[in-house]
Amino acid sequence: MISPGEYFVEGDLAAAYGAIKAGCLFFAGYPITPASEITQAMAELLPRVGGKFLQMEDEIASISAIIGASWAGLKSMTATSGPGFSLMQENIGYAAMTETPIVIIDVQRAGPAIGQASRPAQGDIMQSRFGSHGDYETIVLSPNSVQEMFDLTIKAFNLAETYRVPVIVLSDAEVGHMMERLIVPENVEIVNRRIAKSLQETTIYDESLVSPMGRFGDGLELMITGSTHRPDGTRDTGTPEVQESLVKRLVNKIEKNRERIENWEEMYTDDADILVISHGASSRPSKGAVIRARKEGIKAGFLRPKVLWPSPEKRMKELESNVKKVILPEMSLRGYKMEVERIFRGKLLHMPKVGGVVPTVEEILKKIREASL
Amino acid sequence: MKAKEIIIDRNLCKGCSICIHVCPKKTLGISEDINEYGLFYPKVEDLASCIVCRLCELYCPDFAIEVVQE
Amino acid sequence: MITSRYIKENYVRRLPSAFCPGCGDGQILNAIIRAIDHLKIDRKDVAAVSGIGCSAWIPSPYLRVDSLHTTHGRPIAFATGLKVANPRLKVIVVSGDGDATGIGGNHLLHAARSNVGITVIMVNNGLYAMTGGQVAPTTPHEAKTTTTPYGNPAFSLDVSRVVAAAGASYVARWTTWHMNQLIRSIEKAIMKKGFSFIEVLSQCPTYEGRMLNMDHIQMLEWFKNKFREDADGIYKIGEFVDIEKPELTEELEKMIERVKK
């Protein structure tokens, strides 16, 4: 299924294709604009590959069900948008705490609250990292094309299986609903979790701080809990060292492997005075504006994180000493601002555009010209 | 049926005395001693009266009592 | 013959439990174990799922099967995913009245409606015990709890009737006094193809006892004398629903076979 070749599809459908290609066999979701097309596509595709689809009573049930299915050994996913993503936050923390690989696609729309249901925005970036309470880390990917909805959904599954974390694909209504060419390649790299053969194996961490995962029904007598627990699953909420070592490992699992996870695209950065950093839908006009600026003789460069969390911190720090100004066009008043400002400080010219529309090449080019003066 | 022994695990018993209450033959009573939690565990008053119905085992919330059949 | 020693050696992870002296949760653990043992099903084919509350601790950590201790109110949704992903598993949810009908009421309704083949054992003590005896959807009108110090202005839910109306395949209500009936009921529920639900009235000596001005022995006597098959409302015990009808995971499998062709 999803045979190699060229397709002309919308982003949401490409994400569903990617999930099927990655080996997803379980999807639970709840209808919401602008992510419903993913849910509908999974309802149609999954039974054809022997997978299970459930439409649940709400988004909390959806994420609960996919965590349950993941412990039964199936690669599992859900898709939603802002309001549903907010409802899922508690169990995103639960997945992080229990080290359950799951994939969540958030097709962002303008908020807060119900906002503009069918309009794109990029306001969920901080939430995607910090939305659940307590200390934990997730991985967040940012596709900017139909092709990347496919590619990064596969990557999301691979990262989830590798690091046993919830991985979020942070798309938006623009990318989710746009139609473009999609190339499904002959070969796709697929990663599968290591399955533990004994309870003992689940307590042995590799150099990435990840242990093989048990599976319900294999007779391991697993004890999975969202409470603070020892490596073998025994609940222990009273020993400071148990909480400390668990939480530190959950965070370090991402932090210590961040250079393997980080991923970005860059262009004209070698001699750039003005760096345009952008992600998702707004990165498309941003790139166009940088190309136009270069033609005008302005030394503009372009950096696009494909993985938002962990951010390309090291690369941004390298570029910091050479660039004079940084422009961050995005569809949010806060978006990725704090992360970029943390590194570039006074050099940042934030360019938020709210209203549910993508910034244009002209608008960004104007900002680059102003910065170059 | 006769009981050879009624074993009471003092470390598991929380002294709720449900076993004493459900026993149809008044085989059990409350001991004068306390266990390490400071709770009065049951004691066997009259082993010969036990009919090995095992209601005490069925109702004990703590798996702390066991009737050994003769 | 199932003895305490046999149970401890084969089915219990560790003891003593964290339950208060005289709490019914230990009895319900005992009942679940005896039902599993009577059925002679392999422990590795049993999965227990629970949420938050005292009764959530019955399977996790005490019951020696794969157990998933989840977030408050959500065990039925987790269990649905687990069951659909691996239909071979006998999935047992142990949930309190607050967990199953307060924060998680929606999941209970929809699991019953979709007739997913899981078993929910709802331990009903009429209030939120673990958090300190607050009012629950099952607390009687005018009852005093820590958050209704002047009496409960609201009214309580007859959960079994609601679940029956929602479409469950099996619904029963017992109390911790009715141990043998409860065990037989759990056996039937586990083997029932569709969604099965057992409400167990259980004594909470610490908070419910305070609310009712009774100790755990008096509560067991109350269960024995007041809760009868010919009684009315919440006091009515017995099997309310016991039917066979198409079940969700089976229907899904059939659909997949049809579509794959």
Image (spheres, coloured by chain):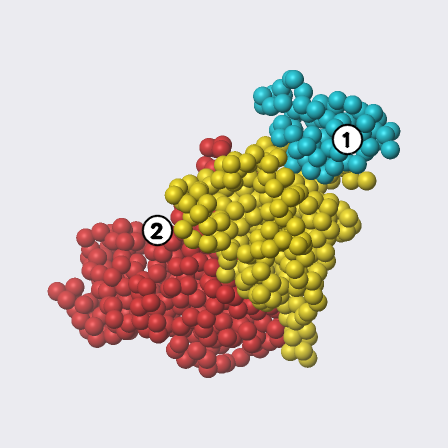
- Determine the colour of chain B: cyan
Report helix, strand or loop for mark 2: helix
Quadrant containing the N terminus of chain C is top right
Residue C230 visible in the displayed image:
yes
Q: Where is residue A293? Give x, y as percent.
A: 22, 71
Q: Which chain is yellow?
A: C
Same chain check for tags 1 and 2: no
Quadrant containing the C terminus of chain C is bottom right
Viewer-proximal residue, A293 or A145?
A145
Q: Is residue C114 depicted above or below A217 in this figure? A: below
Residue A232 visible in the displayed image:
no
Residue found at x 40% / y 48%: A133
Q: Tally the marks.
A: 2
- Determine the colour of chain A: red
Q: Residues within 10 Å of mark 1 (few under 14, many from 20)?
A: some
How far, Cα to Cα, is label 1 from label 2?
A: 78 Å
Q: In this view, does A203 lie to the left or right of B63?
A: left
Nearer the observer: mark 1 or 2; the answer is: 1
Viewer-proximal residue, C173 or A140?
C173
Residue type for callout 1: Lys
Q: Where is residue A184? Give x, y as percent.
A: 52, 75
Q: Where is residue B3? Give x, y as percent.
A: 83, 29
Q: Quadrant of residue A178?
A: bottom left
Picture disc at residue A69: none
In the picture as drawn, the residue positioned furthest to the left comes out as A373
Residue found at x 66% / y 33%: B18
Picture disc at residue B25: 1
Viewer-proximal residue, B39 or A155?
B39
Report helix, strand or loop for mark 1: loop
Picture disc at residue A314: 2
Q: Is residue A310 depicted above or below B35 in this figure? A: below
Q: Residues within 10 Å of mark 2 (few under 14, many from 20)?
A: few
